[in-house]
Image (cartoon, rainbow, N blue to C red):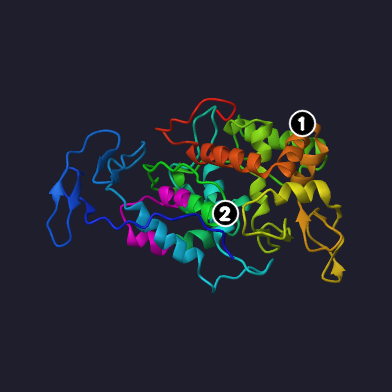
Amino acid sequence: MWSRFARCTATPAFRFAKAAAGCAPTLQAPGSRGIALASAGAATVVAGWVVARPLGGVSSCEAAVDWNAVRKEIVKVLDNDKYVDSSYDGATPGPLFLRLGWHSSGTFCKHTNTGGSDGATMRFEPEMSWGANAGLKLAQDMLEPVKKQFPSMSYSDLWIFAATVAIEEMGGPKIKFTSGRTDKLSGKECPVWEGSTHKDGRLPGADMGSPDKTAAHLRYIFNRMGFDDREIVALSGAHGLGACHTDRSGFWGPWTRAPTTVSNEYYRELIENTWTVKTTHKGKPWKGPLQFEDPTGDLMMLPSDIVLIQDKEFRKYVEQYAKDQDSFLKDFGAVVGKLFDGGCKGSTAKKGWFS
């Protein structure tokens, strides 16, 4: 069911623990009281362990986290056979974890340097109840046991790391992960939905009433985060995973027939399939928002998906990725890494067309 990458399974003989005094991390052998390490800047590597330093925010320090151990626990959640999805068979939480990481990062505004993956403010109102975040409380709840096992790990790091693990477990590229995000303390620190540079909201909408307006909306939202047309199309490839739900977004159905595998299938469906306005659902009139379906009625596309083949600048990248999966996977890995770094105070993303 899952395409897997090789996992690191080393079990170091030492564990780190947070020192009670001075917030200095400690190196602790099993059964020992712990040996204090000096708390200097950046990251310290000891015996193969990375002592992560915070990139900024509320917390003043962070104990080292065994990310290999965290990964194993996340994979256990991903492999839980009891997970079901009403929109498609063979579901896993992978697409949901990716969406959690995506939406916690996609609030970033490069003009005001607000929002982004640092803070995990989606735990609080009003961000938790933004329409775009419907259903993501489930993802948070599923990861809560992992957080309890590793209390020194921030929620904001956990959400992003879980998204990167999910991508890899679904056969996607390895996404660079840098720890050190810190958690905000209340809803007072949630990014503001409306503002001079984000008057259309913080996250992209599915339909703005016409193809031209929807294309302009996508550019407005993604340009604010620092993305260009190519990056917008590459990020949209995440729609190849998971499905929409009538009790969340109001839309229904998966985009592809491989909703738990990272691939270029989304772009192939856009180009090669036939898409018409959905009018019925399971033999009854469709009463949901405007969406498109293929001739079988099994697959769907949002207006914001269809506009990628209606707009000539977007379409050229759709055609490129439909023909070349390796090109898509390369670009998808780079742009998702950039998305997840948005709002991190210590981010050192490489320059280039992904800058």
Q: Is residue 198 left or right of residue 142?
A: right
The amino acid on which the numbered mark 2 sits, given as a three-letter code, is: Gly
Q: Main secondary structure of the magenta part?
A: helix
Image location of residue 56, percent across then percent down = 36, 36
Labels 1 and 2 touching (C-beta < 8 A): no
Quarter of the rendering occupied by the N terminus: bottom right
Q: Nearer the viewer, mark 1 or mark 2?
A: 2
Image location of residue 150, percent across then percent down = 33, 57
Q: Is residue 234 left or right of residue 273?
A: left
User: In which quadrant of the rendered view does residue 39 lie?
Assistant: top left
Extent of the magenta region? 144-161
Between 108 and 230, the one lying in front of the other is 230
Which residue, given by chain and number where applicable, does mark 1 sit on?
Answer: 313
Q: Is residue 112 magenta?
A: no
User: In which quadrant of the rendered view does residue 244 lie?
Assistant: bottom right
Image location of residue 239, percent across then percent down = 67, 51
User: In which quadrant of the rendered view does residue 59 lie?
Assistant: top left
Q: From where the camera sits, is residue 132 visible?
A: yes
Other-residue count near label 2 (Cα within 10 Å), few / some / many at <14 / 14–19 / ≥20? some
Which residue, given by chain and number where applicable, does mark 2 sit on?
Answer: 171
- Does residue 151 sit above or below 284 in this rendering? above
Q: Is residue 321 left or right of residue 111?
A: right
Q: From where the camera sits, is residue 202 visible?
A: no
Count every numbered label the image shows and give the total: 2
Other-residue count near label 1 (Cα within 10 Å), few / some / many at <14 / 14–19 / ≥20? few
Q: Is residue 287 left or right of residue 67?
A: right
The amino acid on which the numbered mark 1 sits, given as a three-letter code, is: Glu
Residue at screen point 65% across, 50% down = 263
Tag 1 secondary structure: helix
